[in-house]
Amino acid sequence: MALQMRPDLRMSQQLVMTPQLQQAIKLLQLSRLELTDLVRDELLENPLLEESQELGTGGDEGGDAQSGADGEREAAPEPAAEAKVEEVKVGEVTDDFDWKSVLENNTYLPPDPGAAGGGGDELPSLEATHSAPETLEEHLLWQVRMSNYSERDEEIAEYIIRNLGNDGSLGDTTVTQIARRLETSTLKVERVLRKVQLLDPVAVSSRNLAECLWIQANHPEHPIEDPLVLGIIAKHLHNLENRGYQAISRDMGEPLEEVYEATKVIMGLDPRPARDYTSESSQYVVPDVYIHKIGEEFVVTLNDDGLPKLRISNYYRSAIHSDAKAKEYISERLRSAQWLIRSIQQRQRTIVKVTKSILKFQREFFEKGVQFLRPLILKDVAEDISMHESTVSRVTTNKYVHTPQGIFELKYFFNTGISRRGGDELASEAVKTKIKILIDNENPAKPYSDQKIVELLRQEGIDIARRTVAKYREQLNVLSSSKRRRLF
Protein backbone atom coordinates (compact mmCIF):
# COMPACT_ATOMS: atom_id res chain seq x y z
CA MET A 1 0.00 0.00 0.00
CA ALA A 2 1.48 3.34 -1.05
CA LEU A 3 1.81 6.15 1.43
CA GLN A 4 0.60 9.55 0.40
CA MET A 5 -0.06 12.96 1.91
CA ARG A 6 -3.50 14.58 1.66
CA PRO A 7 -5.50 17.25 3.54
CA ASP A 8 -8.04 15.94 6.04
CA LEU A 9 -10.68 17.85 8.09
CA ARG A 10 -11.76 16.63 11.52
CA MET A 11 -14.08 18.13 14.15
CA SER A 12 -13.20 17.65 17.82
CA GLN A 13 -13.69 19.31 21.19
CA GLN A 14 -11.02 19.96 23.78
CA LEU A 15 -10.63 22.07 26.90
CA VAL A 16 -8.13 24.89 26.43
CA MET A 17 -6.94 26.62 29.58
CA THR A 18 -5.89 30.19 29.05
CA PRO A 19 -3.05 31.66 31.14
CA GLN A 20 -5.61 33.80 32.97
CA LEU A 21 -7.69 30.75 33.84
CA GLN A 22 -4.60 28.90 35.04
CA GLN A 23 -3.80 31.86 37.28
CA ALA A 24 -7.33 31.84 38.74
CA ILE A 25 -7.05 28.12 39.53
CA LYS A 26 -3.63 28.65 41.08
CA LEU A 27 -4.95 31.44 43.30
CA LEU A 28 -7.67 29.14 44.64
CA GLN A 29 -5.22 26.66 46.14
CA LEU A 30 -2.66 29.14 47.47
CA SER A 31 -2.35 29.60 51.21
CA ARG A 32 -2.60 33.04 52.76
CA LEU A 33 1.18 33.54 52.91
CA GLU A 34 1.66 32.29 49.35
CA LEU A 35 -1.06 34.65 48.10
CA THR A 36 0.61 37.58 49.85
CA ASP A 37 3.97 36.74 48.23
CA LEU A 38 2.37 36.41 44.79
CA VAL A 39 0.63 39.78 45.11
CA ARG A 40 3.89 41.42 46.21
CA ASP A 41 5.63 40.02 43.13
CA GLU A 42 2.83 41.30 40.89
CA LEU A 43 3.13 44.75 42.45
CA LEU A 44 6.80 44.78 41.47
CA GLU A 45 6.26 43.50 37.93
CA ASN A 46 3.06 45.31 36.91
CA PRO A 47 3.35 49.13 37.04
CA LEU A 48 -0.43 49.55 36.76
CA LEU A 49 -1.01 47.81 40.11
CA GLU A 50 -0.86 49.85 43.29
CA GLU A 51 -1.43 48.97 46.92
CA SER A 52 -4.33 50.90 48.38
CA GLN A 53 -4.60 51.74 52.05
CA GLU A 54 -8.38 52.02 52.00
CA LEU A 55 -10.41 49.27 50.33
CA GLY A 56 -9.38 45.66 49.67
CA THR A 57 -9.77 43.31 46.77
CA GLY A 58 -12.40 41.21 48.51
CA GLY A 59 -15.69 41.46 46.70
CA ASP A 60 -19.28 40.76 47.67
CA GLU A 61 -19.47 37.54 49.64
CA GLY A 62 -22.70 36.49 48.04
CA GLY A 63 -21.46 36.69 44.46
CA ASP A 64 -20.98 33.80 42.08
CA ALA A 65 -17.47 32.34 42.34
CA GLN A 66 -17.26 29.51 39.88
CA SER A 67 -14.08 27.99 38.55
CA GLY A 68 -13.89 27.50 34.81
CA ALA A 69 -11.47 24.56 34.99
CA ASP A 70 -13.78 22.40 37.06
CA GLY A 71 -16.94 22.32 35.03
CA GLU A 72 -18.07 25.85 35.86
CA ARG A 73 -18.49 28.72 33.45
CA GLU A 74 -15.31 30.64 32.59
CA ALA A 75 -15.27 34.33 33.38
CA ALA A 76 -16.33 36.60 30.55
CA PRO A 77 -13.56 38.28 28.54
CA GLU A 78 -12.61 41.78 29.59
CA PRO A 79 -14.00 44.72 27.61
CA ALA A 80 -11.81 47.45 26.21
CA ALA A 81 -9.19 48.82 28.56
CA GLU A 82 -10.43 52.40 28.37
CA ALA A 83 -13.95 51.45 29.41
CA LYS A 84 -12.92 49.45 32.49
CA VAL A 85 -10.49 51.76 34.25
CA GLU A 86 -13.14 53.33 36.44
CA GLU A 87 -14.81 50.02 37.25
CA VAL A 88 -11.79 48.31 38.80
CA LYS A 89 -10.43 51.40 40.53
CA VAL A 90 -10.77 50.70 44.26
CA GLY A 91 -9.61 53.85 46.00
CA GLU A 92 -7.83 57.17 45.74
CA VAL A 93 -4.42 58.02 47.19
CA THR A 94 -4.38 61.18 49.29
CA ASP A 95 -1.19 63.19 49.54
CA ASP A 96 -2.35 65.62 52.25
CA PHE A 97 -1.01 63.55 55.14
CA ASP A 98 0.33 65.67 58.01
CA TRP A 99 3.82 64.18 58.37
CA LYS A 100 5.04 67.09 60.50
CA SER A 101 2.43 66.36 63.16
CA VAL A 102 3.36 62.67 63.20
CA LEU A 103 7.08 63.38 63.62
CA GLU A 104 6.41 65.88 66.40
CA ASN A 105 4.16 63.53 68.36
CA ASN A 106 6.05 60.27 67.75
CA THR A 107 9.71 59.96 68.60
CA TYR A 108 12.10 57.06 68.82
CA LEU A 109 13.96 58.62 71.76
CA PRO A 110 13.40 57.12 75.23
CA PRO A 111 10.67 59.00 77.15
CA ASP A 112 11.50 61.25 80.04
CA PRO A 113 11.65 59.20 83.27
CA GLY A 114 9.90 62.02 85.07
CA ALA A 115 7.01 62.16 82.62
CA ALA A 116 3.58 60.86 83.47
CA GLY A 117 2.85 57.20 82.82
CA GLY A 118 6.01 55.63 84.19
CA GLY A 119 8.38 56.59 81.37
CA GLY A 120 11.40 54.35 80.93
CA ASP A 121 10.13 51.63 83.26
CA GLU A 122 7.83 50.41 80.51
CA LEU A 123 10.61 50.03 77.94
CA PRO A 124 11.83 46.46 77.28
CA SER A 125 15.28 45.56 78.52
CA LEU A 126 18.24 45.44 76.16
CA GLU A 127 18.31 41.62 76.43
CA ALA A 128 14.67 41.44 75.31
CA THR A 129 15.49 43.23 72.07
CA HIS A 130 18.19 40.74 71.05
CA SER A 131 17.58 39.70 67.46
CA ALA A 132 18.08 35.93 67.85
CA PRO A 133 18.77 33.47 70.68
CA GLU A 134 22.18 31.86 71.06
CA THR A 135 22.53 28.67 69.05
CA LEU A 136 24.01 25.41 70.33
CA GLU A 137 27.00 25.82 68.01
CA GLU A 138 27.75 29.33 69.31
CA HIS A 139 27.36 28.20 72.93
CA LEU A 140 29.76 25.27 72.53
CA LEU A 141 32.37 27.19 70.51
CA TRP A 142 32.39 29.94 73.15
CA GLN A 143 33.18 27.32 75.84
CA VAL A 144 35.93 25.77 73.70
CA ARG A 145 37.63 29.12 73.10
CA MET A 146 37.41 29.98 76.79
CA SER A 147 39.04 26.66 77.78
CA ASN A 148 42.66 25.58 77.65
CA TYR A 149 42.48 23.70 74.33
CA SER A 150 45.59 23.53 72.21
CA GLU A 151 45.37 24.96 68.70
CA ARG A 152 45.08 21.49 67.16
CA ASP A 153 42.52 20.31 69.74
CA GLU A 154 40.46 23.45 69.18
CA GLU A 155 40.41 22.73 65.45
CA ILE A 156 39.17 19.18 66.09
CA ALA A 157 36.57 20.36 68.61
CA GLU A 158 35.26 23.00 66.19
CA TYR A 159 34.93 20.39 63.44
CA ILE A 160 32.98 18.08 65.80
CA ILE A 161 30.68 20.90 66.92
CA ARG A 162 29.94 22.09 63.39
CA ASN A 163 28.97 18.54 62.37
CA LEU A 164 26.42 17.99 65.14
CA GLY A 165 22.85 17.21 64.13
CA ASN A 166 19.80 19.28 65.04
CA ASP A 167 19.34 17.19 68.19
CA GLY A 168 22.94 17.80 69.33
CA SER A 169 24.11 14.25 68.59
CA LEU A 170 27.04 13.24 66.43
CA GLY A 171 24.72 11.09 64.35
CA ASP A 172 26.31 8.97 61.64
CA THR A 173 29.65 10.80 61.74
CA THR A 174 32.32 8.47 63.09
CA VAL A 175 35.61 9.18 64.82
CA THR A 176 37.45 7.48 61.95
CA GLN A 177 35.85 9.81 59.41
CA ILE A 178 36.78 12.88 61.45
CA ALA A 179 40.37 11.64 61.87
CA ARG A 180 40.71 10.96 58.16
CA ARG A 181 39.25 14.37 57.28
CA LEU A 182 41.56 16.27 59.65
CA GLU A 183 44.55 13.99 58.98
CA THR A 184 45.08 13.05 62.60
CA SER A 185 44.84 9.94 64.77
CA THR A 186 41.54 8.43 65.92
CA LEU A 187 42.91 8.38 69.50
CA LYS A 188 43.36 12.15 69.45
CA VAL A 189 39.86 12.71 68.02
CA GLU A 190 38.37 10.40 70.64
CA ARG A 191 40.14 12.32 73.43
CA VAL A 192 38.85 15.68 72.17
CA LEU A 193 35.35 14.23 71.73
CA ARG A 194 35.33 13.19 75.39
CA LYS A 195 36.17 16.77 76.38
CA VAL A 196 33.42 18.19 74.16
CA GLN A 197 30.90 15.80 75.69
CA LEU A 198 31.60 17.30 79.15
CA LEU A 199 30.76 20.83 78.00
CA ASP A 200 27.41 22.42 78.77
CA PRO A 201 24.96 20.85 78.05
CA VAL A 202 26.49 17.63 79.35
CA ALA A 203 26.52 14.66 76.92
CA VAL A 204 26.15 16.77 73.81
CA SER A 205 27.78 15.18 70.72
CA SER A 206 26.89 11.68 71.96
CA ARG A 207 26.65 8.95 69.34
CA ASN A 208 23.67 7.08 70.79
CA LEU A 209 21.26 7.11 73.73
CA ALA A 210 23.30 4.69 75.85
CA GLU A 211 26.42 6.89 75.56
CA CYS A 212 24.34 10.00 76.36
CA LEU A 213 22.97 8.52 79.58
CA TRP A 214 26.32 6.93 80.50
CA ILE A 215 28.14 10.28 80.30
CA GLN A 216 25.54 11.96 82.52
CA ALA A 217 25.66 9.11 85.03
CA ASN A 218 29.49 9.32 85.23
CA HIS A 219 29.84 13.10 85.27
CA PRO A 220 32.90 14.03 87.38
CA GLU A 221 31.00 16.59 89.48
CA HIS A 222 28.00 14.44 90.41
CA PRO A 223 28.59 10.76 89.47
CA ILE A 224 25.98 8.05 90.05
CA GLU A 225 27.73 5.23 91.86
CA ASP A 226 24.84 2.75 91.86
CA PRO A 227 26.01 -0.33 89.86
CA LEU A 228 22.38 -1.28 89.09
CA VAL A 229 21.79 2.07 87.35
CA LEU A 230 24.99 1.72 85.33
CA GLY A 231 24.17 -1.90 84.47
CA ILE A 232 20.71 -1.03 83.17
CA ILE A 233 22.16 1.78 81.02
CA ALA A 234 24.84 -0.53 79.65
CA LYS A 235 22.75 -3.63 78.91
CA HIS A 236 19.01 -3.17 79.40
CA LEU A 237 17.81 0.01 77.71
CA HIS A 238 15.69 -2.09 75.32
CA ASN A 239 13.98 -3.79 78.28
CA LEU A 240 13.53 -0.42 79.95
CA GLU A 241 11.82 0.91 76.82
CA ASN A 242 9.38 -2.03 76.78
CA ARG A 243 8.77 -1.88 80.55
CA GLY A 244 10.44 -5.29 80.92
CA TYR A 245 11.27 -4.84 84.60
CA GLN A 246 10.97 -8.56 85.33
CA ALA A 247 13.65 -9.40 82.75
CA ILE A 248 15.98 -6.74 84.19
CA SER A 249 15.40 -8.10 87.70
CA ARG A 250 16.21 -11.68 86.67
CA ASP A 251 19.33 -10.75 84.71
CA MET A 252 20.75 -8.34 87.28
CA GLY A 253 19.79 -10.52 90.27
CA GLU A 254 18.14 -7.62 92.07
CA PRO A 255 14.67 -7.33 93.64
CA LEU A 256 11.97 -5.73 91.52
CA GLU A 257 11.69 -2.81 93.95
CA GLU A 258 15.38 -2.01 93.45
CA VAL A 259 14.89 -2.05 89.68
CA TYR A 260 12.03 0.44 90.07
CA GLU A 261 14.23 2.76 92.14
CA ALA A 262 17.08 2.54 89.62
CA THR A 263 14.64 3.29 86.80
CA LYS A 264 13.52 6.44 88.60
CA VAL A 265 17.14 7.60 88.68
CA ILE A 266 17.58 6.94 84.95
CA MET A 267 14.35 8.77 84.17
CA GLY A 268 15.87 11.80 85.87
CA LEU A 269 18.59 11.95 83.19
CA ASP A 270 18.06 13.92 80.00
CA PRO A 271 18.01 11.82 76.80
CA ARG A 272 18.09 15.01 74.68
CA PRO A 273 20.47 17.44 76.42
CA ALA A 274 20.45 19.90 73.50
CA ARG A 275 16.67 20.36 73.46
CA ASP A 276 16.89 23.95 74.78
CA TYR A 277 18.89 24.95 71.71
CA THR A 278 16.87 23.14 69.05
CA SER A 279 13.44 24.68 69.61
CA GLU A 280 12.03 26.30 66.51
CA SER A 281 10.14 29.57 66.55
CA SER A 282 6.38 29.23 66.79
CA GLN A 283 4.47 29.45 63.53
CA TYR A 284 1.19 31.24 64.10
CA VAL A 285 -1.82 30.50 61.92
CA VAL A 286 -3.73 33.48 60.54
CA PRO A 287 -7.31 32.44 59.73
CA ASP A 288 -8.69 33.21 56.28
CA VAL A 289 -12.25 33.46 57.52
CA TYR A 290 -14.06 33.95 60.84
CA ILE A 291 -17.22 32.33 62.18
CA HIS A 292 -18.79 34.36 65.00
CA LYS A 293 -21.90 33.52 66.97
CA ILE A 294 -24.20 36.52 67.36
CA GLY A 295 -27.24 35.63 69.38
CA GLU A 296 -28.52 32.33 68.02
CA GLU A 297 -27.02 32.76 64.57
CA PHE A 298 -23.53 32.17 63.16
CA VAL A 299 -22.00 34.85 60.92
CA VAL A 300 -19.21 34.19 58.38
CA THR A 301 -16.82 37.09 57.75
CA LEU A 302 -13.73 37.25 55.57
CA ASN A 303 -10.35 38.17 57.07
CA ASP A 304 -8.67 40.73 54.81
CA ASP A 305 -6.17 41.94 57.42
CA GLY A 306 -2.59 41.63 56.23
CA LEU A 307 -3.45 40.99 52.59
CA PRO A 308 -2.21 43.64 50.14
CA LYS A 309 -5.15 45.71 48.84
CA LEU A 310 -4.92 46.37 45.15
CA ARG A 311 -6.17 49.05 42.78
CA ILE A 312 -5.41 50.27 39.27
CA SER A 313 -2.93 53.13 39.10
CA ASN A 314 -4.25 56.43 37.73
CA TYR A 315 -0.80 57.62 36.72
CA TYR A 316 -0.78 55.75 33.41
CA ARG A 317 -4.25 56.85 32.32
CA SER A 318 -2.91 59.86 30.42
CA ALA A 319 -0.17 57.78 28.76
CA ILE A 320 -2.63 55.33 27.21
CA HIS A 321 -3.35 57.81 24.38
CA SER A 322 0.26 58.90 23.81
CA ASP A 323 1.53 56.45 21.18
CA ALA A 324 0.74 53.02 19.80
CA LYS A 325 3.50 51.11 21.62
CA ALA A 326 2.66 52.67 24.97
CA LYS A 327 -1.04 51.99 24.42
CA GLU A 328 -0.37 48.34 23.60
CA TYR A 329 1.85 47.82 26.63
CA ILE A 330 -0.47 49.63 29.04
CA SER A 331 -3.53 47.80 27.70
CA GLU A 332 -1.80 44.45 28.22
CA ARG A 333 -0.72 45.35 31.76
CA LEU A 334 -4.19 46.70 32.50
CA ARG A 335 -5.87 43.45 31.46
CA SER A 336 -3.42 41.49 33.61
CA ALA A 337 -4.11 43.73 36.62
CA GLN A 338 -7.88 43.50 36.10
CA TRP A 339 -7.77 39.73 35.93
CA LEU A 340 -5.63 39.45 39.07
CA ILE A 341 -8.02 41.65 41.07
CA ARG A 342 -11.04 39.71 39.81
CA SER A 343 -9.35 36.37 40.52
CA ILE A 344 -8.61 37.41 44.09
CA GLN A 345 -12.21 38.61 44.50
CA GLN A 346 -13.45 35.28 43.15
CA ARG A 347 -11.10 33.37 45.48
CA GLN A 348 -12.34 35.27 48.53
CA ARG A 349 -16.00 34.82 47.59
CA THR A 350 -15.47 31.09 47.04
CA ILE A 351 -13.83 30.66 50.45
CA VAL A 352 -16.79 32.34 52.12
CA LYS A 353 -19.23 30.27 50.06
CA VAL A 354 -17.57 26.99 51.03
CA THR A 355 -17.34 28.03 54.69
CA LYS A 356 -21.06 28.84 54.81
CA SER A 357 -21.83 25.41 53.36
CA ILE A 358 -19.60 23.69 55.95
CA LEU A 359 -21.35 25.71 58.66
CA LYS A 360 -24.71 24.43 57.44
CA PHE A 361 -23.58 20.79 57.58
CA GLN A 362 -21.56 21.01 60.82
CA ARG A 363 -23.68 23.45 62.86
CA GLU A 364 -23.85 21.06 65.81
CA PHE A 365 -20.02 20.98 65.94
CA PHE A 366 -19.81 24.78 66.17
CA GLU A 367 -22.33 24.80 69.01
CA LYS A 368 -21.24 21.77 71.07
CA GLY A 369 -17.70 20.71 70.11
CA VAL A 370 -15.61 18.05 68.37
CA GLN A 371 -17.62 15.07 69.62
CA PHE A 372 -20.56 16.25 67.52
CA LEU A 373 -18.64 16.41 64.24
CA ARG A 374 -20.63 14.81 61.44
CA PRO A 375 -19.32 12.74 58.52
CA LEU A 376 -18.84 14.98 55.49
CA ILE A 377 -17.30 14.57 52.05
CA LEU A 378 -16.30 17.05 49.37
CA LYS A 379 -19.18 15.96 47.14
CA ASP A 380 -21.75 17.10 49.74
CA VAL A 381 -20.40 20.65 49.80
CA ALA A 382 -19.83 20.71 46.03
CA GLU A 383 -23.45 19.80 45.35
CA ASP A 384 -24.70 22.28 47.92
CA ILE A 385 -22.94 25.26 46.31
CA SER A 386 -23.08 23.98 42.70
CA MET A 387 -19.34 23.66 42.21
CA HIS A 388 -16.98 20.90 41.22
CA GLU A 389 -15.38 18.71 43.91
CA SER A 390 -11.88 19.67 42.78
CA THR A 391 -12.74 23.35 43.30
CA VAL A 392 -13.86 22.63 46.86
CA SER A 393 -10.69 20.60 47.41
CA ARG A 394 -8.49 23.49 46.25
CA VAL A 395 -10.38 26.02 48.37
CA THR A 396 -10.15 23.97 51.56
CA THR A 397 -6.41 23.23 51.25
CA ASN A 398 -4.21 25.36 53.54
CA LYS A 399 -7.15 27.60 54.46
CA TYR A 400 -8.02 28.13 58.12
CA VAL A 401 -11.17 29.22 59.91
CA HIS A 402 -11.51 30.78 63.35
CA THR A 403 -14.53 29.33 65.15
CA PRO A 404 -15.98 29.37 68.69
CA GLN A 405 -14.33 25.93 69.10
CA GLY A 406 -10.85 27.09 67.97
CA ILE A 407 -8.90 27.45 64.73
CA PHE A 408 -9.19 24.60 62.22
CA GLU A 409 -8.15 23.92 58.65
CA LEU A 410 -11.17 23.72 56.38
CA LYS A 411 -10.09 20.17 55.46
CA TYR A 412 -10.65 19.21 59.10
CA PHE A 413 -14.42 19.19 58.66
CA PHE A 414 -14.33 16.44 56.01
CA ASN A 415 -14.35 13.04 57.70
CA THR A 416 -15.35 9.50 56.95
CA GLY A 417 -18.22 8.03 58.91
CA ILE A 418 -18.12 5.39 61.65
CA SER A 419 -21.36 3.44 62.02
CA ARG A 420 -23.30 3.56 65.29
CA ARG A 421 -26.18 1.54 66.60
CA GLY A 422 -29.41 3.21 65.64
CA GLY A 423 -28.42 3.86 62.04
CA ASP A 424 -26.63 7.22 62.37
CA GLU A 425 -22.90 7.76 61.83
CA LEU A 426 -20.13 9.52 63.73
CA ALA A 427 -17.17 11.32 62.15
CA SER A 428 -13.76 9.71 62.47
CA GLU A 429 -12.35 12.80 64.23
CA ALA A 430 -15.05 12.49 66.87
CA VAL A 431 -14.08 8.85 67.42
CA LYS A 432 -10.42 9.88 67.80
CA THR A 433 -11.48 12.40 70.44
CA LYS A 434 -13.37 9.72 72.35
CA ILE A 435 -10.31 7.42 72.22
CA LYS A 436 -8.11 10.24 73.51
CA ILE A 437 -10.50 10.92 76.40
CA LEU A 438 -10.56 7.22 77.35
CA ILE A 439 -6.75 7.04 77.37
CA ASP A 440 -6.40 10.28 79.35
CA ASN A 441 -8.73 8.95 82.07
CA GLU A 442 -7.31 5.40 82.28
CA ASN A 443 -5.42 3.97 85.25
CA PRO A 444 -1.67 4.47 84.49
CA ALA A 445 -0.88 1.17 86.22
CA LYS A 446 -3.42 -0.72 84.06
CA PRO A 447 -3.76 1.11 80.73
CA TYR A 448 -6.44 0.06 78.28
CA SER A 449 -5.43 -2.28 75.49
CA ASP A 450 -6.73 -1.66 71.98
CA GLN A 451 -9.26 -4.47 72.41
CA LYS A 452 -10.48 -2.95 75.69
CA ILE A 453 -10.97 0.39 73.96
CA VAL A 454 -13.03 -1.39 71.28
CA GLU A 455 -15.26 -2.84 74.01
CA LEU A 456 -15.66 0.53 75.75
CA LEU A 457 -16.60 2.22 72.48
CA ARG A 458 -19.06 -0.57 71.72
CA GLN A 459 -20.81 0.23 75.00
CA GLU A 460 -21.40 3.72 73.59
CA GLY A 461 -22.85 2.25 70.41
CA ILE A 462 -19.73 2.72 68.26
CA ASP A 463 -18.75 -0.35 66.22
CA ILE A 464 -15.07 -0.20 65.32
CA ALA A 465 -12.36 -2.78 64.66
CA ARG A 466 -9.28 -3.20 66.85
CA ARG A 467 -6.90 -2.39 63.97
CA THR A 468 -8.82 0.86 63.42
CA VAL A 469 -8.31 1.78 67.07
CA ALA A 470 -4.59 1.05 66.67
CA LYS A 471 -4.45 3.26 63.56
CA TYR A 472 -6.23 6.15 65.29
CA ARG A 473 -4.01 5.76 68.37
CA GLU A 474 -0.89 6.04 66.21
CA GLN A 475 -2.31 9.13 64.51
CA LEU A 476 -2.80 10.64 67.97
CA ASN A 477 0.86 9.83 68.82
CA VAL A 478 -0.22 7.62 71.73
CA LEU A 479 1.96 4.67 72.72
CA SER A 480 0.70 1.11 73.08
CA SER A 481 -0.65 -0.08 76.42
CA SER A 482 2.59 -1.87 77.34
CA LYS A 483 4.58 1.34 76.88
CA ARG A 484 1.99 3.50 78.68
CA ARG A 485 2.10 1.40 81.82
CA ARG A 486 3.36 3.23 84.93
CA LEU A 487 4.24 1.03 87.90
CA PHE A 488 5.61 3.76 90.14
Image (cartoon, helix red, strand yellow):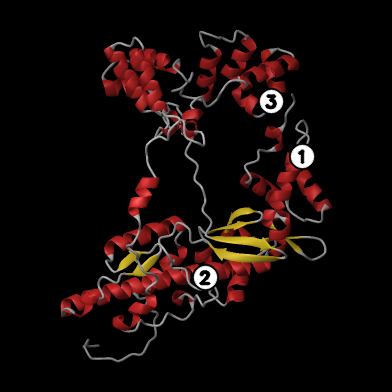
Label 1 or label 3, whichever comes before in sequence order: 3
Count of numbered circles in the view: 3
Between the residue at mark 1 and the residue at mark 3, the CA separation in whole angstroms equals 24 Å
Label disc, if present, on residue 441 of the rendered structure = 1
Report x, y in % for residue 260. Answer: 71, 19
- Taking the image as shown, residue 410 lies to the left or right of residue 242, namely left
Quadrant location of the C terminus in the rendered image: top right
Q: Residues within 10 Å of mark 2 (few under 14, many from 20)?
A: many
Report x, y in % for residue 284. Answer: 51, 47
Label disc, if present, on residue 149 of the rendered structure = none
Q: In terms of secondary structure, where does tag 3 sit?
A: loop
Asked if residue 77 shows in the view, the reply is yes
- In the image, residue 346 sits, relative to residue 184, either above or below, namely below
Report x, y in % for residue 190. Answer: 38, 15
Label 2 amino acid? Thr
Label 2 or label 3, whichever comes before in sequence order: 3
- In the image, residue 271 sits, relative to residue 35, either above or below, namely above
The picture quadrant where one finds residue 344 is: bottom left
Quadrant location of the N terminus in the rendered image: bottom left
Camera-nearest residue between 430 and 285: 285
Residue tagged 2: 350
Residue tagged 3: 244
Label 1 or label 2, whichever comes before in sequence order: 2
Label 3 amino acid? Gly
